Image (spheres, grey):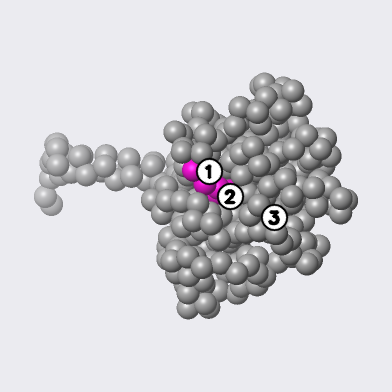
């Protein structure tokens, strides 16, 4: 019988250690990305645009994709489990480039089960490409209007508050004002997601007695002076505001007047902005809420 060597080759030890390190890394990735029973709502740092990821269990809803294919890809890679290549629902609030561009990348990289968007007449190269991909890939797609409700399961409800029937016409920007406004709720915690709607849409929502009261307000139109009117803030009555915006943008967003209005309404420490905070994630069980910031 051959005698076993008294030593183990260094090369063998090296490969064993590398294998163990790889296994440890995979276990760590699984642990930090594995779904739980809480509702996660992340306002993704995609620059001058909007992208919001809703996660409940192993389901994801992505609202808008921002202006950059690279940024949305990186953000989803950070938030979604590495083995999950399916997004259950994608919502395009309106066809402006800073909301739709990243969604072209999403349709190419992920299996998207359902697509929702408003029935708006709009012509642009990137929007046309997105529509072509939606129809080519056979994703289930449909138009949305105010009054629709989507049960995401686990006590999570997504309510469509805008666009109205009939659509608003003759406003400062019909494309923005007829964008999709959503109210997401679980138990006592709620989010009002206002896309790029402006004061005309806000006024219509108030007059129609829409269910606006919400814990967290996604500030309209990246903090532009066209949105977040005093009357609207009174009805929404938020505790926290989030502004999705890019640094050094040419529009001067967020406007000083809007920030001052928010500070007077909810306090300085309750306003979060992707410029300063990076991706902003809220986690809730329907009663309590936790906040995670990237920066």
Q: Which residue is mark 1?
A: 44
Q: Which residue is mark 3?
A: 171
Q: Are marks 2 and 1 in contact (CB under 8 Å)?
A: yes
**For residue 13, side relative to residue 66 (left or right):** left
Q: Nearer the viewer, residue 89 or 283?
A: 89
Label located before the other in sequence (3 or 1): 1
Classify residue 259 by image quadrant: top right
Q: Which residue: 74% across, 61% down?
A: 168
Q: Is residue 106 above or below residue 44?
A: below
Q: Residues within 10 Å of mark 2 (few under 14, many from 20)?
A: many
Place of residue 224 in the rendered image (x, y in percent of width and height, measured from the top left): 61, 39
**For residue 135, side relative to residue 178 (left or right):** left
Instruction: Tell me if residue 134 can be seen.
Output: yes
Q: Nearer the viewer, mark 3 or mark 1?
A: 3
Disc 2 on helix, strand or loop? Answer: strand
Label annotation for residue 8: none
Q: Which residue: 76% across, 43% down?
A: 190
Q: What count of labels does the image hold?
A: 3
Q: Which residue is mark 2?
A: 53
């Amino acid at each position: 019988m051959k005698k076993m060597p008294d030593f183990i080759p260094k090369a063998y030890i090296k490969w064993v250690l590398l294998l163990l390190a790889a296994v440890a890394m995979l276990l760590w990735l699984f642990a930090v990305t594995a779904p739980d029973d809480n509702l996660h709502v992340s306002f993704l740092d995609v620059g001058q645009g909007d992208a919001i990821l809703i996660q409940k269990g192993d389901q994801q809803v992505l609202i808008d994709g921002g202006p950059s294919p690279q940024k949305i890809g990186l953000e989803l890679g950070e938030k979604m489990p590495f083995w999950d290549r399916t997004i259950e629902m994608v919502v395009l609030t309106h066809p402006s480039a800073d909301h739709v561009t990243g969604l072209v990348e999403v349709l190419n990289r992920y299996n998207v089960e359902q697509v929702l968007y408003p029935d708006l007449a709009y012509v642009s190269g990137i929007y046309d490409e997105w529509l072509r991909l939606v129809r080519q890939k056979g994703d289930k797609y449909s138009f949305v209007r105010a009054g629709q409700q989507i049960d995401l399961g686990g006590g999570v409800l997504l309510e469509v508050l805008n666009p109205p029937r009939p659509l608003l016409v003759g406003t400062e920007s019909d494309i923005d004002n007829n964008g999709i406004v959503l109210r997401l709720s679980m138990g006592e915690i709620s989010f009002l997601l206002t896309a790029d709607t402006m004061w005309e849409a806000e006024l219509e929502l108030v007059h129609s007695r829409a269910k606006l009261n919400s814990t967290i307000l996604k500030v309209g139109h990246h903090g532009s002076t066209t949105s977040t009117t005093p009357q609207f803030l009174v009805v929404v009555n938020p505790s926290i505001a989030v502004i999705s915006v890019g640094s050094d943008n040419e529009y001067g967003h967020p406007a000083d007047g809007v920030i001052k209005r928010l500070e007077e309404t909810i306090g300085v420490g309750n306003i979060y902005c992707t410029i300063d905070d990076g991706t902003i994630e809220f986690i809730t069980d329907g009663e309590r809420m936790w906040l995670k910031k990237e920066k």
